[in-house]
Each structure stands twice: as structure tokens, then as C-alpha cells.
Image: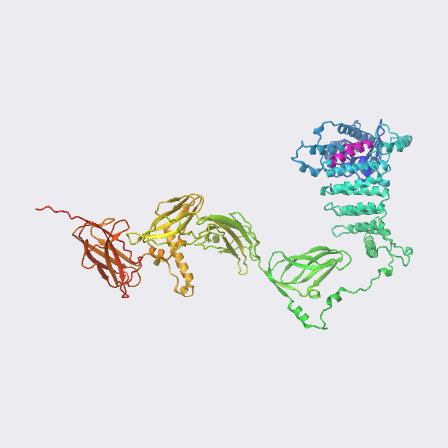
Amino acid sequence: MSIPDYMQCAEDHQTVLVVVRPVGIVPEDQFFRIYKRIASVAQVSIQDSQRNLYIRYRHHYLPENNEWGDFQTHRKVVGLISVTTCGSAKEWPQTSDRFHSQKDVFGATLYDSRLLVFGLQGEIAEQQRTDVAFYSSYDDCPDVEKRVEDFVESIFIVLESKRLDRATDKSGDKIPLLCVPFEKKDFVGLDTDSRHYKKRCQGRMRKHVGDLCLQAGMLQDALVHYHMAVELLRSVNDFLWLGAALEGLCSASVIFHYPGGTAGKAAGRKPSLAQGQGQEADAGKRHRPGALTANGISADTSSEIGRAKNCLSPEDIIEKYKEAISYYGKYKNAGVIELEACVKAVRVLAIQKRAMEASEFLQNAVYINLGQLSEEEKIQRYSILSELYHLIGFHRKSAFFKRVAAMQCVAPTIPEPGWRACYKLLLETLPGYSLCLDPKDFSKGTQLDVPLLCVKTVPYTVRLSLQLYIINKTHTQAQTSVSVRSVELLDLPVSLRPHKQKGLLENIMSSKSPFIYSPIIMHTRGEERNKTIEFRWVQGDVCEVQLMVYNPMPFELRVEHMGLLTSGVEFESLPAALSLPAESGLYPVTLVGVPRTAGNINVNGYHTSVFGVTSDCLLDGLPSVRTSGCMVEVIPSLPRLQLSTSLPRTWTKCPSKEELSSSVSVQLFNGETQQLTITLENIGSEDLESLEVTSKTCNTKEKLFGEFLSWDLEEVVSQLPLKPGQSVTLTVNIKVRLDFSGGENLLQDLNDDGISVTGLPISSPLRQVLKPRAETKPLGSESSKTDYNHVKVGLTPLPSPPLFSKLSSVLLPQTRQCHLLLDVFNSTEHELTVSANNNQDLVLHASECQRMAIQVAKFDFHTLPQPDQEAVRYTNPKLLEEERLHAQASMINSTLGITWNIISFGEASVEGVLNQLVLEHLQLAPLQWGEYTYKHTHTHTLCDVGDAVPLEVKLTNRSKNAVGPFALTVVPFQDYQNGVQNYDLQDAVTFIGSNTFYIDTVNPTENFVCMGALLFLYTGDFYLNIKFQDDSSGQGKELPPSWFGLPSVHIKALEAPIEAGA
């Protein structure tokens, strides 16, 4: 329910509701003429019974209020009387259909209905029907009241049958649950077998039966049922229906204590016209409204009071009303029920002469929120409050609410203000303020009750009088006119005359300085004139300015229109309205607007509309404000991008003011790659003409190798410019490559070869957190159109699948090949497979370590691109060295192609374990050596004992500079394969010539050949170790093996075959 019935009283609970409505086109005056005759039958004595049935008629009733009929049965429409005009038999079918359509509106609750047809004559009118009555005209209808009485008796029969049916219901667990409209959705899925639910059903049904008994005239039974309902509903905390049961108990007690009613003369009961005058008198003696039962109870008062032991006392009635209203207040949808209960309690208290308690109920009624009310509903509410305050003797309070209702009649929101109604209501407020417009009734020195209200009321009345006079003059052609009282203006009494008061301006202008004039203050004011604000506004966006205001007046101040005063650019100010309490402190007010053009805007002040007076307040004229305005730069509209990513969102700290970020999270193994799809949607009104994407890595504790984020903008740029509403997709590759090096000596049981080189160990934590961030910077058509959007990628690398603890190199017989030995450790809990180019896969279990050998060709690092000489001059040498090492490591990683596979796939890098010694072994030496022997096989050279074995050594200079001179020495030895090598072979091997060769200077791209021979005297396996010396400095020193990479030469000497003699 949304519209309360302010005329309800406690005795309405014993009435049944009948709606009287016109059907089709019925003259308004004729309808209300018949309606008054129908409404005169407000009480009918039921034949063969000592009970009366009371009827409440309404010509307008909202169907939504009918839905509350189970909650309180007097709100249920049980009867419908339709009045219609039918001129001919052709109109009768349409009239009958309209009547049935009206019945369908209240069909669920109707007990019976009647149709009164006026103007129809003929065969149809002669038909005898119980639900339709035909009359020739509105003047010829003598038995309308008798038909209404028969109609009411039929309603009573249905009511009595329903009461008996509900009162004698022995179904127990099958009692239905009665609900109000807003409760139905709350009881879906409840356990209908619980004791709590059954008690709720029983309590609500008891209360419903009490309502039916009260309507049927059985007061004593109603009291019993209400008391039982209260006990049942209180035990299950069903507060809404408990309040209804308490209100029903109060209504039954009020009917017993105050048989004359609480609504005054308007609600007096009228007996049926079918009874004779003697019958009326007898009925009045032996039976009064609200008789107790239908069993012939005596009309003796003492007997009735004795029997009505369940009836509440007058004091208890008010206490129960308070309790019921408190229960209603727990439900926001029961505001109308709560307000009507307050009105009923006030009417009871008015009869009891308890004005102060009645004022408490009215004060509660003022603050009940009924949602959005129309202007007519507000006027009606204030008028009823005024009448109720007048009823309890609060005349000044009554005048106050009547004045509020008068002002509501001419509110600015009403299209056609009701000036006459406002003037009429204002005249009625004057007695409440002890005011009189007649000078003869005004005595000098009379003390006014409320001077401030009097000052407001008298000018309003005079102004309205003049306005109505003008309206009356301009509508002289109207037949009816409004008489306006003449008003004689009088001098204001002494108590109302204005007095000069000390203003606040003097206190504000006072200075704490001891000097009469201080130039410091003026200088400070001059510095803050047209102060430039550091931030910027954007064209077309809503901008805000906050002010601190206060109300120094002793009454509430309503500011109906408040906005900014600006200059410089076109600015649309959006008005604001506020209400400041009396003598309020500082109150923040936010004024908003939209700059329509770009440039510099000056905020000079604000404008207000108070009491209908518009004022422009400049900051330059306010002494308490030290600035005369402020200037803000308005930049052109920017493209607005909305970012969405394919990875899950994650929590992040509040970003700074300069960045708007969208954070995502991902977990990757070291070396794993994953794609991030970023969708950029233009949600603004400007075209996005260009796009730049940059990235930076922050909060990293470990060194990253290679590019962490990579992307290709060509496809995205090809779709620009991006129109509003369009979107593009950018794919970003996330590749994490940290240090793969682990602790050293993971393979303590594996012995290194004598010529292997151990890499420097670099320890690394198994788990670390990185927070890289990619930035996208969209640019507009102008350089000033810049904005930043960030995508923060929170990365948690899982343990590095393979950890390399040591890197060694072994030279192969070919000078351009070598072996890399890697000690690989599986730091995960899964089975790990490590692969490399042209190499077998290595399978490691959890926490297992193995050695992996990879054969690779040596690398020519000189082919890498060299930095520009100009850049080398201005770059830090340490940074240049890091870039050189990174380039060499990238070449090695791409050649090795080490990958791992667990539950996912990734790449591994040896960059963390590389050092200078290993790089020297892997680098292709600028000097290329080659040896040639006779009968050379794949693994060794064969010769016969006693035969000369030629040896040829060729040197090729691939460096950029000339090299030499060199000394080359050939040393033979035998290897017994047990760690012992024998170099004392003077008796087994001899050289033909010298075992030392001298090589002169060799220019770039040239070569030099040394030739010699050996003679083996015994059979066996021999090895030749070729050593070099650089004689350019005159000192014999050994050069690095990477420059002279000749391996040992294996020669096998065999017995010479015996030739057969001739």
C-alpha cells in the first residue's frame, strides 16, 4: 500500500468494505446522488439475530490495497455496487460486459455484487434478477435502500459461513499460511513441517478468525481469538502479524468502551431504514453497536463488563497501540499500516483527554517515510495532521501544519498553483497564532505567541490577497467569484520592529596586527589573485569545485539553485540545491560543471538563489576568502581506452595518481613462455590515431636475461585510427629467463677431465617474485593528448626446472669442435626431460643430478655486430662488456637449443655459468692449424717400423693482424692408459732432422707449412704432443690452448712385412 486512509478509526475494524463505482458514462452529480443514498445504509440489523453488520463505502479504492485483505479483513473489498446509465437494449450487452470487468478487478475477494441500471425500459428491464436492479430514471428509484439492505444481508451470510468454516477448522497441520504481499517471496523454500512454521500458521489464522468475528458482531469471541493469536505469534517472533493482532485487540476494546465511536460526528452509525421508529428505539435500548455475541446477551452494562473479561482497559489500549506501532516500524513496507495505527491511537487519546500522549503519536507519524508522495498527497497529509492537532487542543501546532499545507499548494513543482486554496488555508492559520485581520480586535501591547511565525504569516496572507484580487479582476466573466477580504496595513508592534545588530563583517575585518595598515596582508592577497591550479580539466568531462559554506541565520536556509561563475572558456554549470540547518557549522558543497571548449578557465565565484532572490557572489568580494579566483587549464578531449586482459585479475596496491593500472598474475617456470592478450577498446568520443607500447621491469631481485616482454605492433597499427566503440587486440609474449646456475659440486663423485674448465658457481634462490609492468601510451592527434594506462603483470617463477652447477669444455681432435659438459640438477618435484640440438634426451627424476655432454662447433664471435665507435666513446665500459657477453651467450644458447619438458615446455640458458675460460675454449681461434700424416685413418695413423713417417703442419691466419714468429716443437710419448705417460723415448723414436720448426711472420689470410719426418724403431702406440712458443718477444712462453688447438696425434707402429726372396 502506498496511499494511507487518514479517516480510518478503530471501529472501522468491525466494518465490511463495499465499493460503489460507475460503469460507463454516468453524470457525476447523479452518481454521487445515488452514492449518498447507498451510503446511508451504514448499519443493518440481521434478522433472527441480535447482531448488526456495519458497512464502509468507498467510491474509489486501489486494487493493491485489496491484497492486504488477509492481514486485516476490513481492508478487503467484499461487495461491489455498480451504477450505470443504459438508454437502449442495444447498449445492454456492452454494459453487462463492463460490469463483469469491474467484478474481475476484485473478483478474488468479492462475496456478492449488484448492478443498478438507470434509464433502461422494456423487456430486459422486466426480467427478475437478484444481481441487477432496473430503474427508469434517477428520480424514480424508491427502493434503492431496500435493495442495498438485501445485498448487505447476503454479504453477512457469506461472512458468517467463512467465520464458521475458519473457526471450526480442525485440519491441524494443513492450516494455510496467510501472507502480506511483500512476504510471499520470503517464505519460498521454508520447512513446512517445523513446529515454528506450524505455530506461525496457527497464530495468523487465529488473528484472521478474530477479524471475521469482529466483523460478524461477535465481540467476545473476537477478543478470545486475538488473545490466543498474540500468544502464538509472540512465541515465534512474527512481529508484523503480532502488531496486527494487538491492533485488533485494541480495536475490539475501543468498540466496547466507546460505543459512540472515536471519529466524531462524521462516523455516526445510521440504522437501517427498513426498521420502524419503534424498532429503532427498541434496538437502541437492547442492543448497541458492537454487541458481544449472537446468543441474546442482555444489554445490562454490568453484565457485559463482567463477561468481557478479555477486554483491555483504556490505559492498556494505549500501551498495546504503542507496542503494535513499534512492531510495524520494523518493516519499511508497512509504513501505511503504521501511520494509520498512529491516527487511530490519536483519536482514542482525544476522547480520553490525554493530549500529551497523543502528540507523541502524531510526532511519530510526521517522521514515517512513505516514499515519493505527490503534491496532493503531501497537502492531504499536512491538512490531516493539522486537524488532529486541533482535535487534541494543540492549536498553534495545528496552525503550523496548516501553513505548511498552504505553502505546498503553491509549490514551484505544481504546474497550476492553487492560490485560492493557499489563501483559504492561510486565513485558517491566523486564529492558531492569535492573529486577527480586523483592527478593532487588535489591542495595543498584546504579546504575540510566536513573533517569527507571525512575521512570515501576515505578509504571505497580504500578498496572496493582492494576487487573488488581480486574478479576480482578470476573470470578471466568470459566474462565480471569490470574495477577498480587504487588509489594512498596520504599523509593526515594537516587538516585531527590526533592530540593528552588530554584523559579522566587523569581526571578520578585524586584524590581529597592532598596526592600522599592514602592507603584508595586501601583498599576500595580491599573490593569490588568479591562482593557477596545478592539475588540469578535460574538455567534455565533469569537473568539480568544493566550497565550505555555513548558515549564520537562526532558521533553516534552503538554497534552491547554486552554480559556478566562470570566464575564459565556454562552461556549462550544473546547478545544485542544498538545505543548511540553522546556525550550522562549515558545510562542504560540491559544484560541478562541464567545460565545452579548451583553454584557460577562471573560476571567479558562485551564484545562488535564496528565497527567490538570485545573487552573484564573487570571491574577490568575500573578505574571508584570500583568493580572488583560480585559473585551471582545460585541455582538449582525450581518447579513452579500456583495457582487458586474457589473464586472471589480481589484487594490487592502490596506484599512484599518475597511473591507472590493471593487474594480472601468472606463474611460470624459469624459461617458460606464455601469451598475454590485451584488448584495447576506445570508450571515448575521440579517435585513437597512434599507439606506442613500452615496458619496464621493476622490483626485480634477480637479473633477467633477454627480453621479458615482447610484442609486434604492426597488426595493431594497421587498424588505426581506432574509432569510438572499436577495439584492437595486442598479443604480448611473456618469457621469463632468470639465472639457471645452481650450487657448485652437485656431482662430487664425477671426476673432471684434465683439460676441462670449471665454470664459476652462481647460487640462485629456487623461488622469487617479479612484478614486471607493461605500459601502453596512446597518443592523440595533438602532442598534448597524452594519457597512460598500465597493465601490471605479477610474475611468480616456479623453481628452475634444470639448474646448471658446472660447465666444462673438452677439445676434440678436430680443432673446430669441442664438447660442453653440463652438470644438470632437477630442482622440481616432477620428472624432467632435458633436450639439446643433435643430442640425446636426458631424463632426470626429482632432485636428481646428471652430467650432459653436448658436441658443438666453436663459435666465431668476431662475426657479431660491433658497436659504433662514436657510441663506444660515450658509453660506460662496464655496460659495453655486459652487452658483449650477452651477445656471445645468446649465440651459444641459440646453437645449443637446450629445452626442458615437465608439465609444460620451456627453454634453458647457460648464460649464468659462462666465464672467460669457457668462452676462450668455445671461441674459434684466429689461427687455424692442420696436421697431415701418411696412412691416416679415422682415429690414428699406421706406419711400419723403420719407415719414415712424413709430418706436415699447416698454419692459416684468419685474424685481422699479422702473427708470428712462432716455434713449434713435436714431443712423442706413450700413454699406458693408467694415468702414466712415458716421455723417455730416445731409443724408440727418432726425428729425421730437427723436432722443432720455426714459423716466420704470417700475414692475414695467408698460410705457412712446416714439413718433417719421424722414424719409429719399435712397434707400439705412440702419441705426438705439439707445443708452440711465441718468439716475437724473445721470451719463450706458452700461448692459450684456444689459439693453438692441435690435438695429440696417434700413430701405431707395426712390424714391417718380410719380403720373400727371389
On the rendered structure, is 565 left or right of 376? Answer: left
Q: Position of residue 991 (x, y in %)?
A: 19, 57
Give the quadrant of the N terminus: top right
Q: Give the residue at x 80% y 43%.
A: 343
Q: Is residue 216 left or right of residue 282?
A: left
Q: Which residues are magenta?
A: 209-234
Nearer to the camera, 1008 or 146: 1008
Rendering coords of residue 609 (x, y %): 73, 58
What secondary structure is the stretch in magenta mostly built from? Answer: helix
Name which quarter of the figure residue 31 lies in: top right
Q: Position of residue 388 (x, y in %)?
A: 83, 45
The number of callouts visible is: 0
Q: Is residue 128 shown to the viewer in this render?
A: yes
The residue lying toward the viewer, choosing from 630 and 595, is: 630
Horizontal side, residue 900 vs residue 375: left or right: left
Task: Judge whether residue 212 is colored magenta.
Answer: yes
- In the figure, residue 228 lies in which quadrant? top right
Which residue: 76% across, 34% down? 229
1043 in magenta? no
Give the x, y percent position of residue 1003. Answer: 27, 63
In this picture, is 390 found above or below 996? above
Q: Nearer the viewer, residue 399 or 917?
A: 917
| Color style of the picture | rainbow
Q: Is residue 12 visible?
A: no
Indicate whether 345 appears above or below 712. above
Toward the left, the furthest residue is 1062
Identify which residue is drawn at 33% across, 55% down.
921
